Amino acid sequence: MVLPKLPSIRSKREIGTALSEINVTPFVDVMLVLLVIFMVTTPMMQSGIGINLPRAETDTAPAEEGLRLAVTAETYIYFENSVININLLESRLQQYYYGKPKKILYLQADENLPYGFVINIMDIAKKIGIETIALIIEPIEKKNRSR
């Protein structure tokens, strides 16, 4: 009678180690592809706020540090890159300027925005004690006239 050959302990280890190893090459390939996709698409997601600023001949570059408040033609108010309601503007401005010695606000208002809406925003800012409100415009390029 011939007994069947039983696997030895050594052959079990070899089988066990072969099954427990994971091939990470496809995982690394997929992760690199995802990294490239995120690197390409991230700049596209960080788009600016669509505002058509009024044009003027004089340039108004912000000289000091302050808060930039952007208002679109659809009356969306952007406070630190997030949209807020005009009813919450007063409390958010109070929180932002709390304890700051200089209170300067730079207002970027769309040229198609109703004049009364801009006045409402400026009134809210003055109520909480903002000393300076600067209106940001887009400068008109002067043509060089040579004779």
Image (tube, rainbow, N blue to C red):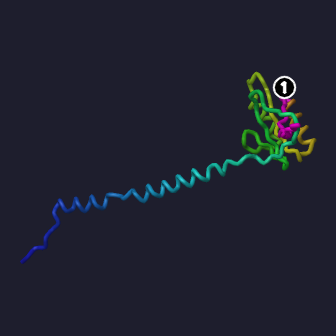
| Residue at 82 percent of width and 39 percent of height | 108
**Does residue 56 lie above or below 19 as drawn?**
above
Residue nearest the viewer, comparing 22 with 32: 32
Tell me what residue is drawn at x 78 percent, y 31 percent: 62
Above or below, comparing residue 16 to residue 125 in the picture: below
Determine the residue located farthest toward the right in the rendered image: 116
Occupied quadrant, residue 145:
top right
Q: Which residue sits furthest bottom? A: 1
Residue at the limit of the structure toward the front, as seen here: 147
Q: Residue 128, position in %: x, y? A: 83, 29
Question: Residue at image x 21%, y 62%?
Answer: 12
The residue segment tinted magenta is: 127-147
- For the C terminus, the quadrant is top right
Pointer 1 residue: 131
Whether residue 129 is visible: no
Q: Is residue 59 magenta?
A: no
Image quarter of residue 136:
top right
In-front residue for pair 143/93: 143
Describe residue 53's horizontal placement relative to residue 43 as left or right: right
Judging from the image, what secondary structure is the residue with disc 1 in? Answer: loop
Q: Position of residue 137 (x, y in %)?
A: 84, 38
Tell me the crowding category of disc 1: few under 14, some 14 to 19, or many 20 or more residues within 10 angstroms, Cα based: few
Instruction: Give the position of the N terminus as an image quadrant.
Output: bottom left
Residue 106 lies, in percent from the top left, at 80, 34
Amino acid type at circle 1 is: Glu
